[in-house]
Structures are given as structure tokens and as C-alpha cells.
Image: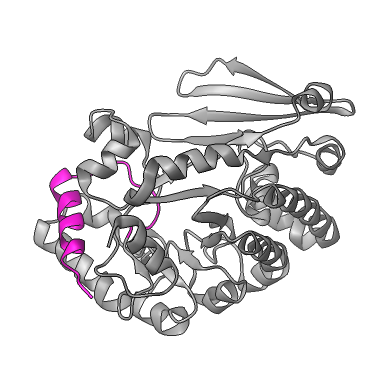
Amino acid sequence: MTSRERMLAALDRKKPDRLPVTTHHLMQFFVDTFMGGVSFPEVFDSLGLEAIDWVMPLGYDEGAREDHWKIVVEEVPDSSYVTHRHTIHTPGGTLSCILQTNQYTTWQAEHFVKTKADMDLIGRYWVEPFCQADKVNEAAARIGQRGIVRGHCITFDVFGQPGCWQDFCCLRGTEQAILDAIDDPQWVHESLAMLQSHKLNYVRSLAGARYDLLEIGGGDASTTVISPSLFNEFVAPYDAPLIAAIRKQGIRVVYHTCGGMMPILEDIAAMGPNAMETFTPPDMGGDTRLAEAKKRIGDRVCMIGGFDQGHFFKGSSEEETRAEVRRCFREAGPGGGYILAPSDHFFDTDMKLLRAFVDEAKKCLY
């Protein structure tokens, strides 16, 4: 099989020729530090991984953005991090957030929605994007049989996220979003419905785009952050229709939950995604028991992830890394429908362990 055929077979819960092996996002720090700053396609080729081309080409009504949703970025002096304030000017007022960056990643130091009135501004003036399908199709032609084309259902500017609850948490702040869900659930439901409406408009623009896989969800929906009852009240009702709409466009969906998953495995599967990730193990801060997860939902979705990159990409022996690959294959691989990958991002690595990870995966034959 080609890498593309192998990945698609697993995503469709079929049995490929061997275990597909890939990674989540390639982090620029890893590429610069350990791969000499080569292009992302060259990283996949060099390591022998199944390739993923992440593309998110968004288009806008530029005239409407100039009149109703103008974004201004200003650098903020800070002795520790690269810091920028992003201000969105609307006819009804302004929204602003602060992003900070170090050599590894970017995070929010201030959120856009500080008051409930800020969410009203978003609902009234937000100029939503559309998918530039031609650019997705160029990526599909470029990658060919070397892998798949993947994206997110991200629609909000600056720090948008795939799932409705995840988007709300990044707009409001996770702790405050949870308090809002308890103190004013009606307002949270109204906010999530508004975010969902904009995302559904984006999904409609996917017609003709040759995406292989689109991501929904986010770690703030995991049970290391919220309870199963909050998940079923504030997450599933808003993300499930998105999944259905994306699949209606002929595009597969993966639901991303980096963190606790075991109490809501069936709840996520019931939302109808083709695949689930990241199956983070306990030593990485999750709760996944791969064999149990496979038994409970492996006949309904493809499983992606489950590998402990924190302990087996650095600080272990090659034999231990290879044994961890075999454990993942033994517990989640039977019958197909499994893609081996780290449970989310990694930055630092021992290259001989990373190469052992790939080499051993290719020896896991069906």
C-alpha cells in the first residue's frame, strides 16, 4: 500500500498492510532543532512517516472585514516573551487579546471575551471565513500518494479552535467558561449556538475541497478539564451537528480530546466521527487504557495516538521504545482501524528513539 492508502484504510476501520505511523502537528522548534529547519514534507520523507499536509486556506469578504471586523496587531514590550496585543475594531466597540510566544509555542495571556457584551459584539459583527477549496485541492495534488490532507474546523480569528466548546474556552478562558456554565448556562448555550452557526457556514463552504480529514474538538472537552455531565450538556450537542455536516460533504472527521477520555469514550463515538485521538496515557497526564478503549469503541471509530512520547522519545532505550510501539499495536491494532502516533505534540527528542519508533512500527504487519 501507499502511505495514503494505508492511512485511509485505517481511518475507514479497515486492515492495511502494516501499522500506519505518523505524528500530530510538526512543531517548528523540533524541525529547527533536530531536522535542520527543512520543510515539513522533507521531515516526513526523512523519517519515513506517513505524511500529513496540514492546510487551512481561509478566504474573507475583505470589504466587510475592513468595515466591520478590522484587526490591528501591536507589539507589547515584555522581558520574557514575544508579546502582541490583537485588537478587533467593530462598529459597536473593540475586542482585544494578548498572545505570548516562546521558542516552543504560543498561548493566551488575555482573552477576547471579558464581559458578556463582548460576545454580543462577536455575534453582531464577526465576518466569518470561507474555505478556499482550490488551495486545498492544490495540496491534495501536491501530496499525492505520500499521505493525506488534513485541516481544522477553525473559523474565529487569531486563536480560533476546532470545537464549539474549545472555541468558547479560548475566547472566555477555560476556568471562567466552566464557571459560566454553572452560573449562567443559558448564556453559555446561546454563545455556543452562535459559534456553531458560524462554523456550519464554514462547513458549507467546504464543497469540492479534497480534504481527507478534518479535526473537531479540543482538550478543554476532556474529562481532565470538565465532567462527563458538562461534556454531554455543552460539548456534544454543538459538535455532533458539525461532524454530521462535515461528513455530508464527504470528508472524514477526527475528534481530538487530548486529556481524559475513558469516561466519555462512548459519548464521543456516538457523535459520529470517523476517528478519535489522542488516547493520552496516564504518564502523559491522560487516562487511556488502550486495550479497554479498543474493546469499547474500536468497532465504531479509528483510533489515533496512544504513544507516550514524553517517556519514549527521550530518556529511554531503543529497546524500551520499540516495546512501547509493540504494546500499542498489540492493544489497539487488532483488526485494523488504528494509526500509531504520539499523543499530541512533541518538541524535544532523541533522534535514535524517534527512528526506532518508526522502524518498529513498520515491522507491525497485518
Residue under the point 72% across and 67% down: 237
> Quadrant location of the C terminus?
bottom left
Nearer to me, 20 or 157: 20
In the figure, is residue 285 to the left or right of 310?
right
User: How many numbered markers are drawn?
Assistant: 0
> Quadrant location of the N terminus?
bottom left
Give the image location of residue 163, x and y in percent.
63, 55
Give the image location of residue 311, x and y in percent.
24, 56
Residue under the point 54% across and 55% down: 215
Q: Is residue 361 magenta?
A: yes
Nearer to me, 185 or 239: 239
Indicate whether 248 appears above or below 72: below
Give the image location of residue 28, x and y in percent.
36, 34
Residue under the point 32% across and 38% down: 41
- Whether residue 330 is visible, yes or no, is yes
- Whether residue 51 is visible, yes or no, is no
Coloration of the structure image: one colour
Q: Is residue 16 magenta?
A: no
In the figure, is residue 187 to the left or right of 96?
right
In the figure, is residue 361 to the left or right of 110?
left
Nearer to me, 16 or 270: 16
Question: Which image quarter: residue 291?
Answer: bottom left
Q: Which residues are magenta?
A: 341-366
Question: Which image quarter: residue 336?
Answer: bottom left
Give the image location of residue 187, x and y in percent.
84, 55
Q: Residue furthest right?
A: 92
Question: Which image quarter: residue 193?
Answer: bottom right
